Image (spheres, grey):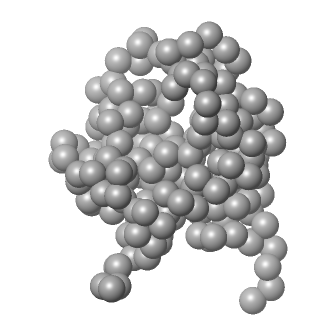
Amino acid sequence: MRELSVRRVYLSLGSNINREQHITAALNALDALFSPLIVSDAYDCQPVGFDGDNFLNLVVGFDTSHSVAELSAMLTKIENDNGRLRTGPKFSSRTLDLDILTFGDEVGVISGVTVPRGEIIENAFVLWPLSNVAGDELHPQLNKTYQALWQAYDKNSQSLSRINFTWHSPSADKVV
């Protein structure tokens, strides 16, 4: 088994059911596994593809030596621990949605996960927070920075607003 190098990963986090509770729980779980986290601003976003309560969305970055398959399994466990139901329509309300956006500069389908995720350039609720935390980094296929992609994005296509959401890292309190 070959050893994986450390890669910077960016995830999209979203919730529209008890959203602050579930996003906080996800951040705490990710922090316990991958501290330190790079956390974007938080955004209030209308659902895309269905009628429902608004989502709380943000992007988190961290370094990992785990494989995509291992990371995906960890994210599924965090979603399940937060009551994520996988029955019903694809576009529906959810307690927690954790998606791998990028995995280093990898391109393609790896262990069933497409990287970079297409939603990066399709949805403001992904691109705007990603441009917050990785603005100067290049999209591995488009060879443009996330900041440049956000500047070129049609901001009238989705209703999105920055909101006040504060998360305090439990690992910051650990005595080393």
- Residue 121: x %, y % from top left: 33, 32
Locate residue 41 relative to residue 49 in the image: left or right.
right
Q: Residue furthest bottom?
A: 176
Looking at the picture, tell me which residue is in the foreground, 14 or 148. 14
Q: Residue at x 74, y 52 (%)?
A: 81
For the view shown, which residue lies furthest in the front direction?
87
- On the question of residue 96 being in view, the answer is yes
User: Which quarter of the figure is the C terminus placed in?
Assistant: bottom right
Front-most of residues 97 and 163: 97
Q: Determine the residue positioned at 69% across, 69% down.
A: 32
Q: Quadrant of the N terminus?
A: bottom left
The reply to whether residue 133 is in sight is no
Residue at 50% x, 15% y is 49
As displayed, is residue 152 above or below residue 111? above
**Which of the 4 image quarters holds residue 94?**
top right
Residue 43's place in the image compared with 73, above or below, is: above
Image coordinates for residue 56, horizontal then vertical, percent? 66, 32
